[in-house]
Each structure stands twice: as structure tokens, then as C-alpha cells.
Image (cartoon, grey):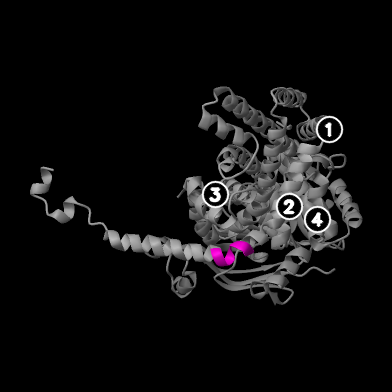
Amino acid sequence: MASHGIEVKNLYKIFGPRGRDFVQAVENGLGKGELNEKYGHVLGLQNINISMPAGGVMVVMGLSGSGKSTLIRHINRLIDPTSGEVLYDGVDVCKMSESDLREFRRHKTAMVFQKFALLPHRTVLDNTVYGLEIQGIDRDESVKRARHWIERVGLKGFEKHYPNQLSGGMQQRVGLARALTNDADILLMDEAYSALDPLIRVDMQTVLLDLQKELKKTVVFITHDLDEALRLGDKIAILRDGRVVQQGTGQEIVLAPADEYITAFVKEVNRGRVVQAKTIMKPLTGSPEGMPIADDMVLEAIAKTLTDTGQSQAHVVDANGRPIGAIDLHMVIAAMVTPTSHLTQAAA
Amino acid sequence: MAQCSFLPNLFCNFPAFDENLMREFKKSVDLSFKAFVRSYGDVLTTIMQPLQWFLNWLQDFFVNTPWIIILIGMTAIVYLASRNMKIVIGTVLSMLLIGLVGLWNDTMITLAMVTVCTLISIVIGIPIGILMARSDRIQSIVNPILDVMQTMPSFVYLIPVVMIFGIGKVPGLIAVVIYAVPPMIRLTNLGIRLVDKEVLEAADAFGSSNRQKLKNVQIPLALPTIMAGINQTIMMSLAMVVVASMIGVGGLGKNVLQGITNQFFTVGFLNGFALVAIAIIFDRASQAYGRRLQKHSEVIHG
């Protein structure tokens, strides 16, 4: 099954009984505060245009109240938009009939929730088969598939446990297994890891990245944590007050934050884990020197390789092993340090 | 009155409707209801006939089966429901005591009545509760009706019931059900409304239909509350059997009624305590069963 991307176009969500009446006004510049004070409507999302890559991880980042959870719920239409389109494989999810929508949710999407949302009266195994059960798939077949994914997320042996008997991290593994068992193309993760403690969170990120390498699903991941966004996202969109402030790859956001708001976020980021060799290399002059470095290697890894081998010079090679640039330890360290301009900008 | 000297008469004596008008009103309502009973009473009685048969059959079954078999059966049910030896021993002891003071047969009649009332209340109450939970409009219509059912003195609604069905078990049954069904409806509604919104959202996200949501999520998660409703219904039916005895329901209630009218102190209390004993047996067994259903919610992980 080839993955398809998701196109979100001109999406508006205004909460309140007469939301539709205010779309025009918001388009013409009516602000969130004014809309709430004067008309008692809450602006959830405004003019969202995001193209989510097929088979890639799209991270939507924002603080609480930025509309990120509202946005992800438009993709499987747990929330109806006020206006706009959500296109998947050329079909507008927002215009689907009730039964088409149910089929879409059953076969094309699977969702993981911040607070796990497991069925407390069902065992791990029975929770995992839930999606297949809803689809009406034969019990033996569902159990077989469910066991496979329970094992993949590292819960083998816990099939007969109830959610309450598991720790938060383990419960979220059940949530992930439940979503993966559905074998849907789209995986929606709504702050899936936000309730977990930091070590387990990193652990679960690794689980997701490993699985994604072979599954190549279209993942939409919601988070409020920029480090998580940078680690997971092939593409990142940053939301603020229901509006996309910036979207692009992690590197693009870290190196060229669109405004002070994002700059303030970015200055706390460990740049060594985001910026890649090809971004800072200088053009090759003469013959390639030192050891070869892959062009998508991050600075921290380069610094470690160079210091481990006691070298200070290296050359950058592309995916085919062709030399395309040069790099040295000094450049690497300079690029890992947060630029002064960002610091002063953020302080101002 | 002194104040009336300076108040207009209108504010002093309440301007009630004309007495003749009220008399006419009462008369015409009474007459039309009597006409209704004359034309449809038989039909309604026929409709309720199966209930009468079922009740008679169950009562005969309880009364005619040798007491030792009933006692063993009851003990087994209580054990299977509660898995608690204390409750089982309490059941056996209190049933033996009831038998010793000569109230076994009356207790069996009451037991049959309460069983049927509880079953009917569950069958009526759960679907209405589900409908109520689904729609705020239905809730706003049903709630005041339930308020009336619970606060209206039972003697008042006994009047039309007796007019239609006469004296007997079925009118008693209807009176008890009217009194006992509201907690069943209310707690089913409450239980379903309290189901965690996140879990419901998850069920939606996986494409559950309404029926699937009800079966897989709402009913199982509302079950503890629904069980509390069943428990309340049982308690209220037991409380009502005395009132029902006034319109021809036999059993412990009838003895209590005789105790009141003849000032038989001992008879009153013995029968009263027999009622209390079965109430406690039902209550402990059904609550222990409810707790056992919820075993999965015990937090074992810290």
C-alpha cells in the first residue's frame, strides 16, 4: 500500500454557534481576542495550509492553546471544520458521508492519544484487537496480528494484563500497538508522549523511528516539545494562536527562525543534534582531505568522530560516496554554538 | 383578621375558583376516566395477563419447591455472585431464622414479587436510561416524569391503577415498578454520561458505529453505576411491598399490614425484620458482584 500525503487547505475552525459567519471577518484580520470579546466565539484555527509528506513524519508543534490538537482532529474529522479542506488521496475528508467517514477511520487512520484512552475493562490483547474487531475481522486473525504488534512494541508476556496494571509508558505502548494493528496508512499521534517521563519518552521516540523506517506510514505527530519535534519530524509546522508561524525541516527552523517567538524556542535547542554536515560545509578546494563524512550526519556525531580519531579535517560525501565539500572541527564547534544574534534577539 | 380591615378583599381571601365549577370539573374528569376504564379496562387487563401468569408461576415455584432446595439454590447464587463466605453464612442463618419463626412461605411470596419487579424495572429502565444518555432533549423530558414518579405518594397513583386492574398482584406490581424504576433509569443515564470522553473519542477515531460504542465502551464502563441502580431498585421494591399489600399482594407485606391494623407488635416486627434480612442479602450479594466485575480497575501498578 503506497502512502499518500495529506493536504490541509485554507482550514478555519471557529468554535461557537455561528462560527461560519465570522470566517470572512477573520480572513479580513479580525483577531482572536476581539472575536472572543465581542462575539463570544473562539478562534481555533485560521488559514491552515500544510502539505503533509506521504510516508513521512509531520510534526505539528505548539504550546497549549495553539490549536495543534484541534488540527489533528480535523484529519479524521473528530472535529468538523468551519471551512476549508483536508485532502487525502484526492478526497476531501470534510465532505465525506457518515458511513464513508466511518470506513475512512476504520481503514485509513489510526490514532494514539495523550492520555492513552485504553478500555480499562479489556486486557492488553483485547485492547489491541479493538480496531480490527470494529472492522469485523475474524477473531483468530485479529489476535494473530495483535500479538505481532504487542511483541514489536515490547509488551510480550503482558497480553493478559489490564491497563491499570501497567505503567504509563507501557500503557502508551499498548496505545501504539492498538494503532499499528489497524494497519492504517495514516498514524495520528496526539501528544502521544507528552504524559511520559523524559527517559521513557526518548525510548518511545526510538520505537517510533525504528518502526517508521520499515512501515513508511504518513505520521502526524503533535507535540509541545521542540526537541521531540526535531528528533522525529521530517517536516515541522509550528502553530501559535491557531496560525502556522513557520513550517519546514527541523534544520530550516533552527537555522532561520521566522520570528522572535520561534527564536526563543530555538535558542534552547541542542543544535549539534539538528544541523547536518551539508549545511555548514564549505566547497571543496583541491582534493578531499581527512576522513569521509556522510552529508546528513549531524554536528554532534561529526565532532565525536573527529575527536575520537584525533583528526580535525574531513570531507563530506553524498549518498553515492562522491565528495561534495570540506569540513573541520573548528567549523563544527562554531556551528554548534547558538549564534549571538539569536541570544540578543530573544533577550530583547 | 385585623389586617383585612385595610386590605382589599381580593388580597385577603384567596380568590378560588367557584365551588360549583370545581365540582363540575372533578365530576367530568372522573366520569371520563371511568368511561375510559369501562371501554379499555378489559383490554389493558388482557395485555397484562402474561405478567400475571409469570408472577403466579414464579410464586408457585418458590412456594411449592421444598425449602431445602430453595435454600441450597439461594446459597449457591449468593456464593457465585459474591465469592464471600461471610455473606453466604449470613444468608443461610437469616433464612433459617425466617423459616423457624414460620415466615418461610410469606417470604417466598415476597421474593417472587421482588424478583419480577426487579426484572421488569431492569428491562424498562436500562433502555430508557440509554436513550436519555444519548439525547439531552429526552433527558429534559424524562427527568421531570421521574421526579413525579418518585415524589408522588404511591397511594395517589394506586387510585387509577386499582380502577383499571382491580385488586390483585398485577396492580401491586405496577405500583412497585413505578416506584422502583426511577433509580434504574437515572443511574443508567448517569453511568453512560460519565464515561470518559477520551475513551469515547478513541472509539470514534477507530470508526465505531453507535451500536459498537454502546456495546464495547459505554455499557461496560457504566456497569458499576448500572449495578448500583439495580441494587437501589431491589431495595425500593422491597420497601414498596408493604404498600402493595394494601391492594392485594400477599407475603410479608400483608402480615405487616395486619400487624398495623390489629396492633400486633410482634407480628409487625418479625415480618419487618424478615424484609430487612432479605434486603441485606440482596444488597450485599449484588454489591459484591458489582465489585467483582470491576476487578480490572484496581490499581496494582503504583
Dot 2 crowding, Cα within 10 Å, few <14, some 14–19, many 20+ = few
Say yes or no: labels 3 and 2 on the same chain: no
Q: Which residue is mark 1?
A: B69
Q: Nearer the viewer, mark 1 or mark 3?
A: 1
Image x and y of residue A177, in percent: 80, 51
- The numbered disc on residue A180 is 4
Image-quadrant location for residue A235: bottom right
Q: Nearer the viewer, mark 2 or mark 1?
A: 2
- The numbered disc on residue A202 is none
Q: Which residues are magenta?
A: B38-43
Q: Chain of mark 4?
A: A
Q: Which residue is mark 3?
A: A340
Q: Looking at this view, is B119 or A85 the one in front?
A: B119
Q: Looking at this view, is B175 or A181 the one in front?
A: B175
3D distance between C-alphas at marks 4 and 2: 55 Å
Q: Earlier in the sequence, mark 2 or mark 1?
A: 2
